Image (cartoon, rainbow, N blue to C red):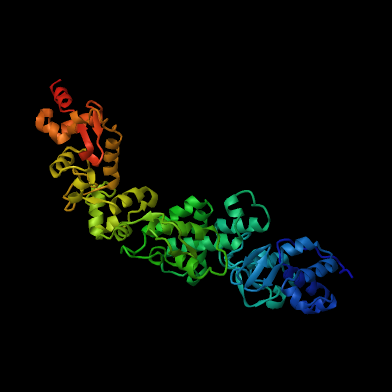
Amino acid sequence: MRLKPHVPFDPQETVLSFAGRLAAMHTGQPLTRLLADMQINVEHFTLGRPEAISRFAEIAGADEADLLKATMRGIRGGVEFRGEHCQSAFLSRAADKYCPTCLAEDGERQDWRQRLIWCFAPAHQCPLHGVRLERLEKSSRTLQEGLAQPPGHQDAAASARTPSYLMWLQSRLDGLCSSDNPWLAQQGIQQVLDASLMLGTVLTAGHKVRAKTLPSMAQEKALEHGFAIYAQGPGSVTSALDLIRSTSDAHAVQAGPLAYYGRLYEWLDRQCNDRDPGPIRDLLREHIIKHDAVDVGEVVLGQELRERRYHSVQSLASTLGINRTRMSRLLQKLGKIPVGASDAEAGVLRFDAQAIATLLNDFETAIPMADVADYIGASLSQMQALYASGLIEPLVPRDAPGSVRQVVFARRSLDAFLGRLSELPAAAPGVADTLHPISYACQRGAGTTIEVVRAILAGDLRAYRTPGEHGLAAIVVSPSEAIALRGA
């Protein structure tokens, strides 16, 4: 069986549109009569089942591959179009919009064609004529079934400029833009346009406005704004997220991502659990992790963080068990925060977790000043002299602005000092009787503790280690050599 006369298929129309034209020409009745004559199940054809499309192509004398490209297959939870899974609200299988100018150019009612691009929710105007699309009172399988009277003339002036996202969509449907923009080419149509709409809505209408509540012209404006950003790639999207966050009304240190990113975050966190919204979710997740100092184990947009990436003043304070204000003062003294920064200013700063790991470890293993003398094997006066001279330095520099009530030393720094002493040779039994502790040499005129220690560390004065002691207490020198060095 083959329909005659042959009617060519227009690649820019839907399969249901093509079938509706054939039905109007050959039967003058709705689509069901033609499909019954073809012995094709109406429901299967309407849902876009491949076997039904294949039989229809054979009888209509059309290329099956071309028809499948124009088929929107009804599946559980949405519509499948050219391998992409779309929501029914985004892509309509039925005829629900049309361009009056296009239909007027099509001519007779039997020649009306439902363009593919009209089926997409973001299409609010005709990309060819620039006029606003009209809506059918009720969605129908075909324009012939849903539109009783020929469309009237469009009184509204045509748009001076076709939105760039609409031009991209038309090129995508025509298969012409796969290589122009690899970033967009690797994403689905709904992924690109939904992300663009959500970005644009927050940027043009505010954090609390739902995109779907905007009038069509406002939606078009928001989508065009967002698409101009999104099409430029991840870097441009990240910059937009910076702007969205900075323009948020949220100022509290404890404010969460919903407050900072508004409906964009809500959409990705609560409305995209059953589908993949594309790379916009990963980009926002990375932005949140960086700016909110997310802790290990927290779930951000569906993924659990397994390694802390960034710290805030608050998270550092919590980790170390100290007051946030004190943590802020300490970080100012360490040069990590600008001196005089307010609590709010310090609260938004972030620190790379790996870069700050050494500082964290130093604080967690810090040795109070009262315990330093025992730790390095020195007397109290020797320790105080080493501290005053800078040979051992506190965790917070002495010359940092402000006062430090509890002076502590990094264990790592003290271990480095002890490590240099441990490199000295052990005293041989034959010469041990001529060697004495540093304090003894100082009492005999060798100079101060600092002068002797500096000479030892510089390699100018021979020194040795004796067993049974540790640190500075284990170091012995020849008093006569020390005195001679001082007099030289």
- Residue under the image location 56 percent in, 66 percent down: 156
Looking at the picture, how far across and down is residue 274, in whole percent?
A: 57, 70
Looking at the picture, how far across and down is residue 464, in whole percent?
A: 25, 32
Looking at the picture, how far across and down is residue 481, in whole percent?
A: 17, 24
- Residue under the image location 14 percent in, 36 percent down: 439
Horizontal placement of 253 versus 199: left or right? left
Quadrant of the image occupied by residue 9:
bottom right
- Residue 356 in view here: no
Which residue is nearer to you in this view: 128 or 157?
128
Quadrant of the image occupied by residue 42:
bottom right
The N terminus sits in image quarter: bottom right
Horizontal placement of 439 versus 423: left or right? left
Farthest residue in the top direction?
Answer: 488
Which residue is nearer to you in this view: 283 or 52?
283
- Residue under the image location 74 percent in, 64 percent down: 68
Horizontal placement of 18 versus 201: left or right? right
Farthest residue in the front direction?
Answer: 430
Looking at the rendered structure, the number of numbered marks drawn on it comes to: 0
Quadrant of the image occupied by residue 88:
bottom right
Horizontal placement of 297 versus 118: left or right? left
Farthest residue in the right direction?
Answer: 1
- Residue under the image location 64 percent in, 52 percent down: 178
Looking at the picture, how far across and down is residue 118, in whole percent?
A: 63, 66
The C terminus sits in image quarter: top left
Q: Is residue 156 above or below residue 390?
A: below
Q: Is residue 371 above or below residue 465?
A: below
- Residue 473 in view here: yes
